[in-house]
Image: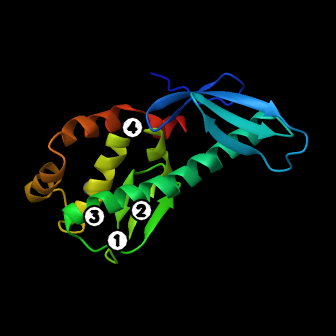
Amino acid sequence: MRIEKATYENGAVLPYLGRSFTLEIRCYPSYRKPGVMAEGDKLVVLTARTENALVERAVREWYISRAAAVIPERVRVYQDQAKERIGRICIKDVRSRWGSCSSKRNLNFNWRLILAPMEVLDYVVVHELCHLKEMNHSRDFWALVEGILPDYEKRRKWLRDCRLIERF
Ligand SMILES: [Zn+2]
C-alpha cells in the first residue's frame, strides 16, 4: 500500500492532537514571517507568500512549537505516578522512533506525537518514564506501564497503525 504524504494547499486536512483541522491559507502581504494558529476546526496560516513549501515549513514549525509546549506538560502529569526524577526533555525530528531516554535520564520525544490523540501521546510519555526504572521491554517494564495506563495496548496499537511518521 502506498502511503500518501500530507499536502499543504488550501483546504487540506491536517491532524493536531488527533483532531482534523482544515488548512486555510490567508494572504497577508505585511507578514514577513508566516503566522500559524488553530481557530475552531481550522488551521490558519497568515502569510505574504503562499508557495506550498513555505506553508509546509510554517505549519511544521508550528507543530514543533506545540509539541515543545504540550509534551513537557504531559511528562509533569505522569512524573509523580512514575516516581522518577528526570533530566531534560527534548523534542526531536527523527523518523525512527516516537521516544527514547538516556542514561542521563533525559527524555526525547518525536514532535509528530502532537499529531496523535492526547491519550496516545500520553502512552509514549509513560513508556519513556517507565524506562527510567526498567531500561528494557521486560515483563516488569510492561507491568509498570500497565499500572499507570491499564489500556496501554489500545494506545500502542493506534501508534503502530497510524503511519504519521511516513506521512509527515
Ligand atoms: Zn521502549
Say if disc 4 is inside 8 Å of ligand 1. no
How far apart marks 2 and 1 lie (CA) works out to 8 Å
Query: Within 10 Å of the Cα at label 3, are there few (<14), some (14-19), or many (20+) other Cα atoms?
Result: some
Front in this rendered view, residue 167 or 73: 73
Closer to the chain start, of discs 1 and 4, is 1
Mark 2, residue position: 108
How far apart marks 2 and 3 lie (CA) works out to 15 Å
Q: Give ligand 1's quarter of the image.
A: bottom left
Q: Which mark is residue 102?
A: 1
Q: Is residue 163 above or below residue 98?
A: above
Q: Amino acid at mark 2?
A: Asn
| Camera-nearest label, 1 or 4 | 4
Q: Position of residue 106 (x, y in %)?
A: 38, 71
Residue 9 shown left or right of residue 15 in the figure: right
Q: Which mark is residue 117?
A: 4
Asked if the residue under mark 1 is in contact with the one under mark 2, i.e. CB atoms within 8 Å, the reply is: yes
- The image quarter in which residue 134 lies: bottom left
Mark 3, residue position: 79
Residue at 39% x, 50% y is: 98
